[in-house]
Image (spheres, coloured by chain):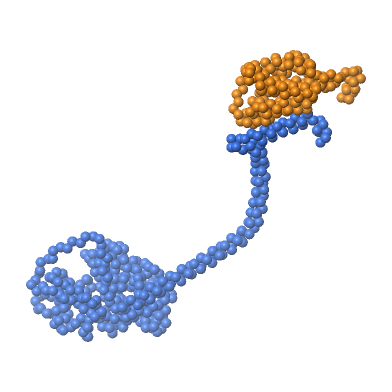
Chain colours: A blue, B orange
Amino acid sequence: MEFFLNRYRNLTVLLVAIVAQLLLLAYQVKSNGEVRLIRVWAVSAVTPLARVIEAGRSGTVHFVRDYFVLLNVRQENQRLKSELDRTKMDNQYLRAELSTADRAESLAIFQQQSPSKTIAAHVIGNTTGVGAKVVIVDRGTGSGVQKGMAVITPDGIVGKVTAAYPTASFVLLITDPSFAAGVISQKNHVHGTLKGQGYSTVIVDYVQNEQKVEPGEQFFTSGDDRIFPKGLPVGETTVVREGKSYKEIFVTPSGLQNGLEEVLIVTEGVHVPIPEAQPTSQTVHLQEPPPAESSDASTIDGAPDQVPAQAPAQPPTQSGPLTTDADRLVDQYRKIGQAEKHIYGQSAGGAPNFNINLNPRPADVVPLPPGAQNPASPGAPSSASPPAPSPAPPPPAPAAKNPGAKRP
Amino acid sequence: MSDLGTDFRLDFGETPLLKKGVSKYHIAAIIGIPLAAILFQVYVPRFFERLSYLELPLLVTVYFSLMRRSPVAGVLFGAGIGLAQDSLSHNPLGMFGIVKTLVGYFAAQMSQRFDVQNAGVRLVLGFFFCFFHQFFYWVLGRALLGEALDLDLQTTLLVAVLNALVAVPLFHILDRLKVTD
């Protein structure tokens, strides 16, 4: 060092003097940002070095830290996955519990509000038949369940009991191809037979092409089949098209939409009126009533199907002339009932003899529709027989035939 | 080899070049002359504006550096005179100091290779260092201070010539202040 200073003494002195004056200059001069030049130089000289050092330090630290972190990341990942799976299962279980509680609550409310007597049952399994839509419920004859009883939910009908055992019963769902039930549309009151197809959609058969059914229209049970009480929701019409002889009406059953876990078995059915359709916003124009057809047109105070004791408290009355075949048919039945002193829904002994001729004139006889049977006959098939057209009378059925259904 | 050469020159009575032309001055002259040059540059141009082109502190720095023939002495002369000049100017301390430090160093280096008693050499060195001083000041001003200084080459050359012309008689006058052994 001493040799170096001696050999380059002049240059050293020069450099010392220059550097000293540079420092002096830098100490005095301020840059545009009112920062002394020496500070700017110091920062400019130190910053790149510090940046390099910091980059190396941070890189080393991150490498070491990430390395040690990655050592446990697999275990942590597995732990988190297991926790997530467990949480998912808990969540699913809680959701199921909540849903079950909701369904149970709705079932209880429906059970209290429904005029029919029902017992709740759980679906505990399916039968093994290929393509069969039959489920097993945990209620059997020990609980009062008998073959032919209706099975419903608050959303709609589900099926009917096809076999009852002491502790369980088989329920044929409405989607089974062998299922049939009488239904009526809500708006236009078109009768038909509900049939399963083996999948989620059911059809309403035996509806004439001339009858009016609109998509979106609700179907309810008509009570014609002696299994389902009148007024239970069936489903919503999705497709309506003209068929060869009958309309092709596809209905989405409402009772099966929310799953099938808890059901109600109707032990004593009570007919209820079909609720009125929601009024639409379309303007309705009332036309002038048609002219009277005959002089004997009179006011009808009550229709036969509204007479039963379980019928609504306000029986519908009709004022004005008899305008349709149904009106005339109702009038005829009323007269027959008066002639035989029969009170519909209250008199014992079944239905009056509708075949008597009150007026021997041929013009007054109203023929029954072809193939129509007496709906009150005990031996009438409940599901497979084609329904009577719209003017079908409400038959007072004998209660002995179907102990589970309380006929009006 | 160098020892043989030195001994040869000593044996035959030849004075080494470094020691041959070294001049000594009284301390009052060493302090007073630069101070007078600085004061001249500060006050005289107030009355004679054209004399502001004269860089008497620079010429004094060159002279003493040349005469002392010591780079360390040249550095000290240049730094002292430059800082003094800075202290009386509006510039930050160090601008003239750095430039004149370099001038003193290189002048002392030059004095070891040339016969600085020659008037022609003094004229050339005066011109060269004056130009170097102006140019390097411009460089420092732009590099360190960021000032947008203009360098008019013709004016710079003309000022360098004028100062060189002044340097020759000035150096001759200053030679009279040498202290003889």
Query: Can residue A41 be seen in the rendering of this structure?
Result: no
Vertical placement of residue B63 versus A334, above or below: above
Which residue is at the front of the view, A387 or B136? B136
Which residue is at the front of the view, B87 or A122? B87
Give the side of residue B69 with respect to residue A244, left or right. right
Instruction: Report the quarter where the C terminus of chain A lies.
Output: bottom left
Residue occupying the point 10% across, 66% down: A291
Residue occupying the point 27% across, 70% down: A275
Quadrant in the rendering for residue B169? top right
Instruction: Report the quarter where the N terminus of chain A lies.
Output: top right
Give the side of residue A66 with respect to residue A330, left or right. right
Vertical placement of residue A207 versus A356, above or below: above
Quick one: which residue is furthest to the right in this view? B11
Quick one: which residue is furthest to the bottom in this view? A348
Residue occupying the point 71% across, 21% down: B37
Query: Can residue A166 be seen in the rendering of this structure?
Result: yes
Vertical placement of residue A159 versus B177, above or below: below
Which residue is at the front of the view, A6 or A359? A6
Quadrant in the rendering for residue B2? top right
The total of numbered circles placed on residues is: 0
Residue B150 percent coordinates (x, y): 60, 24
Residue B145 percent coordinates (x, y): 63, 31
Which residue is at the front of the view, A346 or A225? A346
Residue A364 percent coordinates (x, y): 11, 75
Quadrant in the rendering for residue A96? bottom left
Residue occupying the point 40% across, 69% down: A259
Give the side of residue B131 with respect to residue A292, left or right. right
Residue B99 percent coordinates (x, y): 69, 26
Quick one: which residue is furthest to the left in this view? A295
